[in-house]
Image (cartoon, coloured by chain):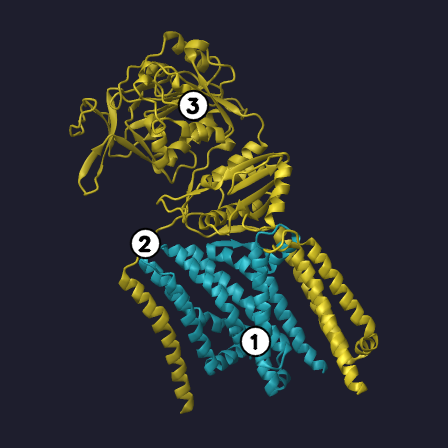
Chain colours: A cyan, B yellow
Amino acid sequence: MVNIPVITRRELSSYFLSPMAYVVLTGFALSHGILFSLGIGSRIEPNMQAYYAFYITLFLLILAAPVLTMRLVSEETNQGTIETLMTTPVTELEVVIGKFMGALVFAAVMFLPIVVQVVYLRFLGPVDVGPVLAGFLGLFLLTGQLLAIGLLCSALTRVQIASAIISFAILIGLYFMWYLGQGSPGMGAAVLRYLSPPWHYVNFAKGVVDTRDVAYFVITTGLFLFLTVRALQLRKWR
Amino acid sequence: METRAGERRRTLLRAAMVLGLALLLAGFMVRDVRARAFVETDYIARALWAAGGLLAAGSLALDWRRVLALLRGRRTAEGVNFVFVAVLGVVLAALLCYITTRRYARLDWTRAGRFGLHSQTESILAALEQDVHVVTLYRSDDSYDMAVVGYAGDMLEEMKARSPHISTEEMDLTLAATQSRINRLLAQLGVSDLAVPAVVFVAGDRHETITFDRIATSSRGSVEMPDVFLGEDAFAGALKRLTAGEGAVVYALTGHGQRQLKVEDRAGGPPQAAGAGAGPARSLSRVASALEHDNYEVRVLDLAAEGRVPEDCDVLVVAGARARLAESELRAISRYLDEQEGSLILMLESPFGVAVDTNVTELLADYGIRAREDAVGVTRMQGLLGQTVTEKTVPVPGERLPDHPAVAGLDGFRLWLEMAVPLEITAEQPAPGLSTRPLLTGVESSWGATGIEPGSQQAIEYNPAADLPPGVIVGAVVEPTAGGGMAQEAPEGPKILVLGSTGAFANTTVDQHRANLYLLSNAVNWMAGRTHLLGIPPRSMDMHIVSVSPSQVLAARYVFIGVLPALFIAAGALVWLVRRR
């Protein structure tokens, strides 16, 4: 596990040296800023506006997560650098965790506008700190899950765009389950609701930390990272 | 030609296989999910499964040689291994997720505790042994409905977390598919219609309907954004009524100009004819509704006709008698208190507000309480323009309330008693086994002013020689004290709650100061020995609407649409320039 920080640093420097990172950061800040500003009128409720800031992030992440993760493994596979990486004394698990952590730290930088927005709302009126902290916790867990899905897609394909499209399709599917599962009583609908990340995330944004939601995000993130490790190990056989 | 034909055949079979599997999956999805266009989706699901199964099985059967060859290949072995491990991982994850949904905790991180439950609700849920199914009927195209559904949904989630006997269901009335479910619900309940939008609690063949207007309201008059949630009390009340046995009985004395609790009370005595208790604004019908909501039966008692307080009376309420009671009536109440160990809530009407000539306060003489009808509770406070004014109202903040079941849960509230008769405690132990103590003590700037002409608008100044001292008492309680025995049983004896004001509990007042209503609800539950059913105070959604100036709106747009994205662009450009050199 000692190699994880090294791989994370490598990933981060690779992120910040590529123009794509700044395109993603700017695109996220701009779209989030536009949507957030639309909610600012002559009279606002700061806590609801803070909730709104977290809520819109939920949807912007569908676009951002695939773009952030698409190159993580598929680029290395395409360029052949994955073979070099795998011949160094690092395990597949360290590679996966290191890359995942790198993407997560980059996402944290991407969320800086939300911090500024909360500060702005605090300047306008009282903002309940608890839901904001819970919102950031939820955002961290949600982002982790979406990045893990993207990482798996990146490990399964050689082409970056294909990886982005597949992970985008999966995320859309997961989000769509939220819509499908609402207002229905059956077991199938309950399962669909449970599988959908937004269903769990909105609780955090409201200020409720439910152990079921935390467990859902931790377990599914762990599952997708595990599958990514297996996908990398599969290469050894070929 | 054969190769090309074979390739085409294989492609077709592969497509058929994928399509078949997709149809099978779609069948599962269609079965349960809401389908806006269809009333029943079962037959569609069955058709999809049949078509999907046929396609998948057919393509497999027609291409069996290739399937066999594929199964023998090395890549297939690798793939199968990966899929096997993946399935194993998914099963393990599903198992873990299932376990975490069986035992879980919800932590409320909001300052106002918006998502927590009152301790009384927790007690009710802990004692719940019967399955209760809760159905929320709403319209998804109505913003008020959706706001209430949000609040109610969170509260019901909390309830589900505390009791395995609670299950929930939502029905969106805008969906055509919901109609068949509503019909099934109506048939189950044996009713032809239900008030909507509402939350319906169903336990066996009994049900309780709580309409949305009883769940959330707005303190600012904004219909679309309710900010006061009353639902917890309503939901807990529904659970109480569904699961509790026979209700207790509260009698309201009539015939002496009291304010109305029940409609029958209109047959009052002469002062009532003057209009004292008449009119919905001045009546106490909200109190009666709250008690009925807590599974009490409120009846009117004409003591002059009955001669005695009925045996089944759990609590007797005298709500601001303005005329004198006959000696026989006073004796009947005394007998009820002493012999039946009864409970009495005595609300006083101040002569400074309306004409009063009553002897009802004579009842208190034996219990160490003296009602100072020659005085009125006043408070020095700051007016709208910052000037000092003295009002004939006594605020009682939550922090001045003692530790007593009658005021449990009111710590965060402020009670307001207008035109209150000040009380004096003359004996803390009026009789063996009885204790008397103040319950409602006004703020430090309040006192009992004397020497004021009723109805006069003269300036009121504190007179230390004649007036009652600051921190005026406007509510007192008499209760039996615990004996010295080892038994932990509740002490026996009469219970009396004296409230210096009746107007404080009138409809118009409790609409503004809900805590006043909750005080009475709590007091009745305490007197009836239902301490586990004490009233649950309303909760604020902790909303603060703030005005944003045009310059602040503009600043937000500049910063969030302009400056922040520009900073990232600048950082990118800087990195590009540095790397170029």
Mark 2 belongs to which amino acid? Val
Determine contact: label 3, label 1, CB under 8 Å.
no
Mark 1 belongs to which amino acid? Ala
Residue at disc 1, secondary structure: helix
Mark 3 belongs to which amino acid? Lys
> Spatial distance from mark 2 to mark 1, Cα to Cα?
42 Å
Mark 3 surroundings: few (<14), some (14-19) or many (≥20) residues within 10 A = many
Residue name at image x 46 percent, y 52 percent: B109
Question: Horizontal and vertical percent for residue B481?
Answer: 45, 22
Q: In this view, does B540 lie above or below B354?
A: below
Question: Horizontal and vertical percent for residue B210?
Answer: 51, 38
**In the foreground, A130 or B211:** B211
Of labels 2 and 3, the one closer to you: 3
Marks 2 and 3 on same chain? yes
Quadrant containing the C terminus of chain B in the rendered view: bottom left
Residue name at image x 62 percent, y 82 percent: A158
Furthest residue in direction bottom, as rendered: B581
Residue name at image x 48 percent, y 68 percent: A60
Number of the label disc, if any, that sits on residue A164: 1
Question: Horizontal and vertical percent for residue B45?
Answer: 70, 57
Disc 3 chain ID: B
Residue B456 showing in the rendered view = yes
Number of the label disc, if any, that sits on residue B155: none
Disc 2 chain ID: B
Question: Horizontal and vertical percent for residue B227?
Answer: 40, 46
Q: In this view, does A9 lie above or below B248?
A: below
Marks 2 and 1 on same chain? no
Furthest residue in direction left, as rendered: B458
